[in-house]
Amino acid sequence: MIIKEYFQFLFPFFFVTFLICYSSSWIDLRKYGEGGYKVIILIVSTCLTFIPFSGLSLADYLLSVNPNFSIGSTALIIVLLMHKLFHNVVLDEKHLVLFCLWNVSLSLILFYSYLGLTTYDLYALGYGFSFWFLIMAFITLLTVWFWTPLSVIFIACIAAFNLRLLPSDNFFDYLTDGFLLVMSLGVLFSCAVKYRSSRAWFQKSAT
């Protein structure tokens, strides 16, 4: 399946695009207009991601560090990129924080399990049908019932696992990975700083 062959390159492309977009404030690219700015960002990120350097592209280097970027990672970087580049709010701050808290909690639980600090090897449950699939189905149904945008992410994780779009056969690898843990912690820290700053400003203006 051609989609499966190239699907793993989505995260490297979006990640590089986000980094370029974030650092573009150092260069005055806005002078080319909003449309021109976006085209330049996409062209530069495409070249940097896929053109080989010393035999390997930047995407290959990223995949060599982490060969299995989860659907959660791809979803989060798309949310951040859409806001940064296109000014579209895919997840509002409340749902973004909930999603990141979910990612951090799940990642830490799996990490503790991997170190043998829990009774069961939770990661091994991802290879076959287990109670975890029922938990995910319940969570997904809840997000669909309450019509939250998080439902799209959870449905995408389940669909991608059923289609085996990633190299791993473990369901947990479709939900989270090390990059997602780091990104989620970064987003939570950024939101905490923003909340603290806005609260301090409000208290100062109220006095």
Image (spheres, rainbow, N blue to C red):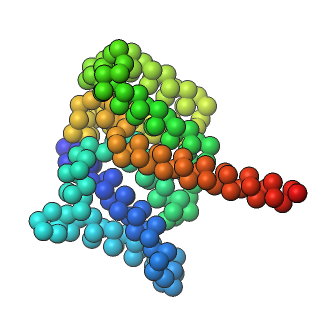
Residue 44 higher or lower than 104, as above or below = below
Q: Residue 102, image x and y in percent?
A: 49, 34
Residue 6 shows in the view: no
Q: Position of residue 7 (x, y in %)?
A: 27, 49
Question: Which residue sits at x=51%, y=85%?
Answer: 31
Image quadrant occupied by the C terminus: bottom right
As displayed, is residue 192 above or below residue 151? below
In the visual, does 126 lie left or right of 203? left
Q: Residue at point 59% right, 50% down?
A: 191
In depth, the one of 105 and 48 nearer the eye is 105
In the rendered image, is residue 97 in sight?
Answer: yes
Identify the residue at horizontal 55%, vertical 26% (top origin): 142
Task: Please identify the residue farthest to the right as the structure is shown.
Answer: 207
Q: Going by the image, does 141 lie left or right of 66?
A: right
Count every numbered label the image shows and give the total.
0
Looking at the image, which residue is at 46% across and 59% down?
Answer: 81
On the rendered image, what quadrant is the N terminus found in? top left
Q: Where residue 150 appears, x then y in whole percent?
A: 52, 38
